[in-house]
């Protein structure tokens, strides 16, 4: 789905965030005349913002306890939490980073959107399926580098707490997954095996039986 700038009604803008974005482009020798952005420039701009947010200036954390009571009260009253994250706090979970990158792209007229889902590469050979935990929930960014062409970028820093840090399942996690398989089989094959399920099974095998 294309999202031409002329049709976008809700584009983020903050002057200080824009100043930061333009300064990053200047540092990387990217033309700041952004009325017409080429494919190559779009990719470079997105990469610059992604790398900036993944740098050691920012910290991934799902714990808000590091903020003082005063800071939390101030954040609740903040009219622009995205700018506060980018310019001041610089610490948060993946949705903060994804929103920050999409906002920075908006300020330089580069269409971007936040995408949510799961980041998983934990493959279960025995059952031929991926194992997905709640902690694998993740948010990232897609940038429209040219009309109808969206590229994926992940501005979340690589850290041990982030969903992008995949680890082997522990012994207890493997036991839990196997138990869930047996529980599902019991529910569907025994408890839920009512008259309707029996009728469906008979209807399925009847042609072969005949």
Image (tube, grey):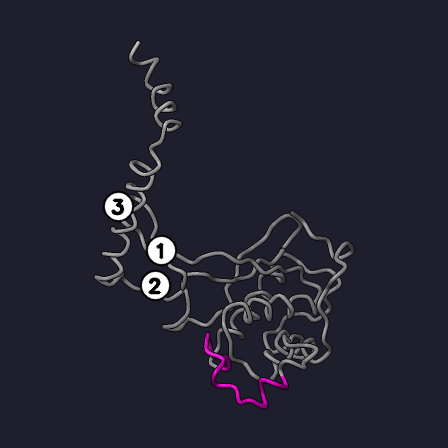
Q: Which residue is mark 1?
A: 121
Q: CA distance from mark 1 to mark 2?
A: 7 Å
Circles 3, 1 touching at the beta carbon (< 8 Å): no
Residue 166: mark in rendering: 2
**Image point (29%, 12%), residue name:** 209
Q: Which residue is mark 3?
A: 182
| Residue 10 at x, y percent in the picture | 74, 62
Q: Nearer the viewer, mark 3 or mark 1?
A: 3
Kindly indicate the quadrant of the structure image that contains residue 121. Answer: bottom left
| Residue 92 at x, y percent in the picture | 51, 76
Local packing at callout 3 (Cα closer than 10 Å; few below 14, some 14-19, many 20+) is few
**Image point (39%, 72%), residue name:** 161
Circles 3, 2 touching at the beta carbon (< 8 Å): no
Circles 1, 2 touching at the beta carbon (< 8 Å): yes
Secondary structure under tag 3 reads: helix
Magenta span:
57-74
**Image point (72%, 71%), residue name:** 13
Looking at the image, is mark 3 or mark 2 earlier in the sequence?
Answer: 2
């Amino acid at each position: 789905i294309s999202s031409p700038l002329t049709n976008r009604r809700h584009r983020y803008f903050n002057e200080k965030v824009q100043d930061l974005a333009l300064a990053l482009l200047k540092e990387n020798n990217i033309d700041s005349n952004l009325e017409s952005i080429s494919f190559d420039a779009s990719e470079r701009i997105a990469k610059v913002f992604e790398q900036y947010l993944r740098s050691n200036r920012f910290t991934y954390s799902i714990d808000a306890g590091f903020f003082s009571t005063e800071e939390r009260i101030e954040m609740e009253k903040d009219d622009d939490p995205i700018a506060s994250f980018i310019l001041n706090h610089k610490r948060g979970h993946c949705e903060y980073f994804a929103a920050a990158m999409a906002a920075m792209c908006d300020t330089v007229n580069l269409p971007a959107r936040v995408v949510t889902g799961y980041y998983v590469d934990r493959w279960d050979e025995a059952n031929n399926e991926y194992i997905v935990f709640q902690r694998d929930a993740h948010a990232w960014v897609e940038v429209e580098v040219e009309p109808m062409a969206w590229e994926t970028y992940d501005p979340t820093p690589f850290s041990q707490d982030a969903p992008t840090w995949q680890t082997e399942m522990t012994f207890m996690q493997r036991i839990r997954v196997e138990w869930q398989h047996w529980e599902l089989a019991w529910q569907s094959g025994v408890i839920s095996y009512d008259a309707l399920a029996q009728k469906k099974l008979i209807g399925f095998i009847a042609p072969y039986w005949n």
